[in-house]
């Protein structure tokens, strides 16, 4: 009997008992759905993170009041962190004098809400005070005009460089923003530069920013205090010099800041030196937790599914003892009977596998549709799903199948 | 031993098909051992038509099961065409059941989930016949037993006589030399029984070897040789 016939007969036998077959395969369905959906989510996460990080500078060190870790800090830690000394524009100036550092750029921002200019408006704009060289550390490309310069800082010039979203929304199509005046919070700035579009980072838009010299910002606005200072205070973006590793620059900056903040050798850093790598490593922790969850859920449900299949196959063998005897009486070999029951187990589990794949892909498509995560199951997960479920069918089907195939034909026919 | 051996002229070249030498069967179900067959010596030539008679419990079914390779003798040897099948392992024995003998049970023993055609197809499936050949043979064999139009019916949609004819069609599917029938008319009324016997007679005419078990003298009369069992021994 060839494989296709065997499988067709197995499916026919499965359909004979539809409800039971469905309940039996539920474990397999859940297991395979989990595998597909979580792999799709992880892949989507990877892809999204890759995109996000490509918009950050790969070599940039972000000096902040706290170590950036994905994962939650306790409230107590938070209070402790907020009491730390703020980073200052002077810290940035000192860092930029290090020989291993190409640029050290202070950066502080505040939300502006909707910004109006005549009949035009732009929603959710951000005002960012930034040092010179902020285009290097932030990977900004100037499409027209220039970026903020040292001269602007020194003279606390009221000039600004605007993101593409701001330029598109506050100026008429075809209107040249350069050298135009822009009123922000009661101060009048001259637009000296327009930036190329960059897209969102971690779900946050970036092209909605208006950059002004950090010295001008500090003159006009008081710095945030308390908890707000942790995320909203000045941070310093440090770009290592050409040919200097991130690690070396990071060590130099650390040493300098410890000295400036008067830390003793036994005291821990009271500031954070965050790099793309350090943020990625905490992301990797999340990723491995997700993998563990997947392996756990999938493993348990496949095991439970497998036991369910074994149970139902044993019941089936007992119910069909007479049938087995008759089949053997008309010429079925032990192998034929083994193959029949094994293929029924495999048919059960693979139908569960296919349903699981469909559900898993649907879940991934749903997530892609309603969240920014581009969840997509790679082709090998489908192979994995089919492979897993068939293997479970074989492993848990073999015992009942052997039991069936070993029956003596006459005893089996007599069995009531 | 009541023998009426009359070989027709056309059957001159008789071949030793079945030979039992000192075959015994003991059922040992723990505390009591039942001796169902004791030291049976029996020869059946190719093309014979044999009826086995005897009181209930005398071992007729046990003998048939051994002849049909459904069970092993406890001792003694069974030669089929000179080959000692009582020494065969499960796999070769399955092949013998599949191709050499066709077995018809008193209780019909069709698979209730399968249609008549699918039931007839089973031995072909296990013999490895192609789908095309299976379809052909199933149609032919069902026609032979006069059930061409009932192939797609399940056993519970057929009469007892029809079911037994399907069972005969199944026994014939692989064109075996020997047909073994254990009380084939036992569960049939006399009219269906007569029709069935005509069918079996036809198979004999076509040269097949037939062995059947019966309690009914009228059925036994169709056979050319009658052997009688009593308490597991030939008399
Ligand atoms: N599986 C078994 N276990 C124990 N004893 C058995 C078994 N099968 C048959 N026997 C016994 O073997 C003896 C012969 O049984 P068998 O079925 O061959 O008789 P039979 O001649 O076919 O009877 P009947 O005409 O009633 O069908 C009986 O005494 C029976 O009880
Ligand atoms: Mg009997």
Image: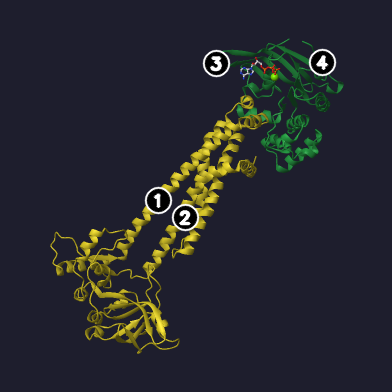
Chain colours: A yellow, B green
Position of the C terminus of chain B, as image quadrant, is: top right
Mark toward the viewer: 1 or 4: 1
CA distance for labels 1 and 4: 80 Å
Establish if A216 lies above or below B230.
below
Q: Quadrant of the N terminus of chain B?
A: top right
Who comes first in sequence, dot 3 or dot 4? 4
Residue A298's place in the image compared with A411, above or below, is below
Q: Are marks 3 and 4 on the same chain?
A: yes
In the structure shown, which secondary structural element does the residue marked by tag 3 occupy?
Answer: loop
Nearer the observer, B13 or A365: A365
Residue wearing tag 2: A37
Residue topped by disc 3: B30
Contact between marks 1 and 4 (CB within 8 A): the answer is no
Q: Same subunit under labels 2 and 4?
A: no
Q: Is the residue at mark 3 in contact range of ligand 1, meaning its CB lies under 8 Å from it?
A: no
Q: Chain of mark 1?
A: A
The residue pinned by badge 1 equals: A293
Mark 3–mark 1 Cα distance, whole angstroms, equals 54 Å
Q: Which residue is mark 4?
A: B5
Residue A410 placement, left or right of A27: right
């Amino acid at each position: 009997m060839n494989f296709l016939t065997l499988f067709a007969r197995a499916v026919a036998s499965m359909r004979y008992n539809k409800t039971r077959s469905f309940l039996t395969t539920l474990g397999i369905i859940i297991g395979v759905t989990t595998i597909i959906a979580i792999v799709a989510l992880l892949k989507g996460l990877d892809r999204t993170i890759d995109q996000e990080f490509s918009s950050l500078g790969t070599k940039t060190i972000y000096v902040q009041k706290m170590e950036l870790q994905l994962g939650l800090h306790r409230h107590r830690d938070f209070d402790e962190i907020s009491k730390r000394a703020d980073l200052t524009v002077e810290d940035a100036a000192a860092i930029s004098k290090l020989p291993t550092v190409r640029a050290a750029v202070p950066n502080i921002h505040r939300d502006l809400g909707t910004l109006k200019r005549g009949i035009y408006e732009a929603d959710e704009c951000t005002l960012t005070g930034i040092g010179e060289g902020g285009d290097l550390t932030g990977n900004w490309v100037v499409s027209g005009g220039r970026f903020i310069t040292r001269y602007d800082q020194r003279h606390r010039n009221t000039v600004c460089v605007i993101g593409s979203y701001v330029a598109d929304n506050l100026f008429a199509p075809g209107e040249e923003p350069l050298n135009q005046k822009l009123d922000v919070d009661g101060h009048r700035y001259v637009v000296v530069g327009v930036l190329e579009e960059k897209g969102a980072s971690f779900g946050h838009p970036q092209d909605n920013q208006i950059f002004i010299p950090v010295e001008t910002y500090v003159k006009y606005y008081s710095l945030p205090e308390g908890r707000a200072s942790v995320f909203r205070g000045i941070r310093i973006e440090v770009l290592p010099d050409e040919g200097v590793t991130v690690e070396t620059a990071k060590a130099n900056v650390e040493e300098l800041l410890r000295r400036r903040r008067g830390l003793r050798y036994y005291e821990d850093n009271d500031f954070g030196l965050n790099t793309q790598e350090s943020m990625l490593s905490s992301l990797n922790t999340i990723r491995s937790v997700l993998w563990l969850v997947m392996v756990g859920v999938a493993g348990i449900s496949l095991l439970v599914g497998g036991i369910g299949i074994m149970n139902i196959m044993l019941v089936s063998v007992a119910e069909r003892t007479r049938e087995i005897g008759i089949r053997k009486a008309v010429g079925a070999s032990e192998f034929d009977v083994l193959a029949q029951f094994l293929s029924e187990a495999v048919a059960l589990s693979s139908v569960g596998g296919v349903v699981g794949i469909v559900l898993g892909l649907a879940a991934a498509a749903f997530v892609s549709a309603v969240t920014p995560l581009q969840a997509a199951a790679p082709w090998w997960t489908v192979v994995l799903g089919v492979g897993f479920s068939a293997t479970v069918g074989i492993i848990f089907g073999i015992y009942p199948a052997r039991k069936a195939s070993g029956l003596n034909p006459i005893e089996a026919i007599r069995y009531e | 031993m009541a023998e009426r051996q009359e070989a027709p002229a056309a059957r001159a070249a008789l071949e030793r098909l079945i030979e039992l030498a000192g075959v015994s069967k003991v059922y040992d179900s723990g505390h009591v051992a039942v001796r169902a067959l004791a030291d049976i010596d029996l020869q059946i030539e190719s093309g014979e038509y044999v009826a086995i008679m005897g009181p209930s419990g005398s071992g007729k079914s046990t003998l048939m099961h051994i002849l049909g390779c459904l069970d092993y003798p406890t001792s003694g040897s069974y030669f089929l065409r000179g080959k000692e099948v009582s020494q065969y392992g499960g796999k070769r024995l399955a092949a013998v059941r599949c191709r050499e003998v066709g077995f018809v049970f008193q209780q019909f023993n069709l698979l209730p989930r399968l249609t008549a055609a699918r039931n007839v197809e089973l031995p072909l499936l296990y013999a490895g016949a192609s789908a095309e050949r299976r379809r052909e043979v199933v149609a032919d064999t069902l026609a032979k037993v006069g059930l061409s139009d009932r192939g797609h019916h399940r056993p519970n949609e057929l009469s007892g006589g029809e079911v037994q004819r399907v069972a005969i069609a199944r026994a014939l599917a692989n064109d075996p030399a020997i047909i073994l029938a254990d009380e084939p008319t036992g569960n049939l009324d006399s009219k269906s029984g007569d029709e069935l016997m005509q069918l079996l007679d036809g198979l004999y005419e076509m040269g097949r070897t037939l062995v059947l078990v019966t309690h009914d003298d009228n059925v036994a009369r169709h056979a050319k040789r009658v052997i009688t069992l009593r308490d597991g021994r030939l008399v």
